[in-house]
């Protein structure tokens, strides 16, 4: 009755020999992942098909070509950049998602989006859980220590306020001594902290800054009167004001006089420093989408052509 174990061992030995001697080296990436072929054309928007570029595909790191995907972290919801397709759905849509699908299609791989809290995104990339970030993230010198940025948009901050701006916010010091909301870990939170100096210079009490893990929570605080305004990206503020409750609940206040001075740092696609060559491939793919009009069509879908930039650059932050 000892034959069965012997047979099993022999079979395993044969399988091992076959696996090691039948051309598996040409079918796997250096990391051991099964190599996938370049993906074919993909429909990114209705009537808009993006074709892959073999030369751009060849620029991708072997590990990315091996899995056939780029793992992308995003903080949902932050409309119109990232949001769920409908209430109760887990399907992600938005500017970042659609542009990511176009980038993936041009590179011949899939941009696989997964939710991640904003303040945990960069640590997650550094830990190897993700290859990239597309989450309306401002390119900042401090963040470049964690990832490299392929800059793709440019937009400033704005206030989301109750309909009609009942607090009459006209200049940034109008919020001194009052409670305002902001999403934690964002550049907007840092800018608000800087605004405290303006209050101090005018002899006014400081702003009470309430930070929330998601901007949707800051919006709820605004609805309930816990804060008088939500400080966020001007594009998102405009989108929420136009769409929430049919446009009946919120207004926006924008412009440097109202939001305070800010640097012209662009938004960037954060790319892992542990994937050599990925940022170059993403930058080249993005530029090709800019050149052929795909990039502009994605922005037009969300009615934000004014946040476009003319050239895809790397690590273009001023501070």
Image: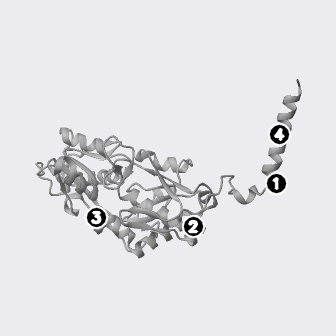
Q: 13 left or right of 38?
A: right
Residue 48 at what x, y percent from top left?
38, 67
Q: Indicate whether 25 appears above or below 12.
A: below
The residues tagged by marks 1 and 3 sit, at their Cα atoms, a distance apart of: 55 Å
Can you identify the residue that label 4 sits on?
11
Q: What percent of the width, then of the height, locates residue 259?
A: 23, 58
**Which residue bears the numbered disc 2?**
57
Query: What is the C-alpha distance between the residues marked 3 and 2?
Result: 29 Å
Tell me if 168 is positioned left or right of 84 in this view: left
Label drawn at residue 304: 3
Single out the mark in the foreground, 3 or 4.
4
| Left or right placement of residue 21 versus residue 26 in this view | right
Q: Earlier in the sequence, mark 3 or mark 4?
A: 4
Q: Which residue carries the number 1 mark?
A: 21
Please say if the residues under marks 3 and 2 sit with CB atoms less than 8 Å apart.
Answer: no
- Between marks 4 and 2 in the image, the one whose residue lies nearer the viewer: 4
């Amino acid at each position: 009755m000892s034959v069965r174990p012997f047979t099993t061992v022999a079979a395993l030995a044969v399988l091992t020999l076959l696996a090691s001697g039948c051309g598996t080296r040409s079918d796997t990436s250096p990391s051991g992942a099964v190599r996938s072929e370049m993906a074919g054309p993909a429909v990114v928007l209705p009537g808009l098909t993006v074709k892959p570029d073999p030369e751009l595909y060849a620029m991708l790191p072997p590990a990315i070509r091996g899995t056939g995907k780029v793992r992308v972290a995003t903080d949902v919801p932050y409309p119109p950049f990232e949001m769920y397709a409908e209430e109760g759905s887990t399907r992600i849509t938005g500017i970042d998602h659609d542009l990511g699908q176009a980038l993936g299609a041009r590179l011949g791989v899939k941009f696989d989006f997964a939710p991640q809290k904003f303040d945990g995104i960069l640590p997650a990339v550094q830990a190897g859980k993700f290859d990239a970030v597309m989450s309306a993230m401002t390119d900042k010198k401090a963040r470049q220590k964690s990832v490299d940025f392929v800059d793709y948009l440019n937009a400033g901050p704005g206030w989301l306020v109750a309909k009609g701006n009942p607090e009459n916010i006209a200049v940034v010091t109008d919020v001194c001594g009052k409670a305002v909301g902001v999403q934690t870990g964002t550049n907007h939170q840092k800018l608000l902290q800087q605004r405290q100096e303006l209050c101090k210079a005018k002899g006014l009490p400081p702003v009470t800054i309430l930070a929330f893990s998601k901007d949707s929570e800051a919006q709820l605080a605004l609805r309930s009167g816990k804060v008088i305004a939500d400080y966020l990206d001007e594009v998102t503020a405009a989108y929420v004001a136009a769409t929430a409750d049919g446009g009946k609940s919120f207004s926006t206040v924008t412009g440097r006089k109202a939001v305070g001075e800010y640097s012209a740092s662009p938004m960037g696609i954060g790319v892992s420093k542990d994937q050599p060559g990925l940022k170059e491939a993403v930058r080249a793919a993005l530029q090709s989408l800019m050149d052929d009009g795909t990039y502009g069509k994605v922005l037009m879908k969300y009615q934000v052509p004014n946040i476009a930039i003319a050239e895809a650059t790397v690590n273009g932050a001023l501070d």
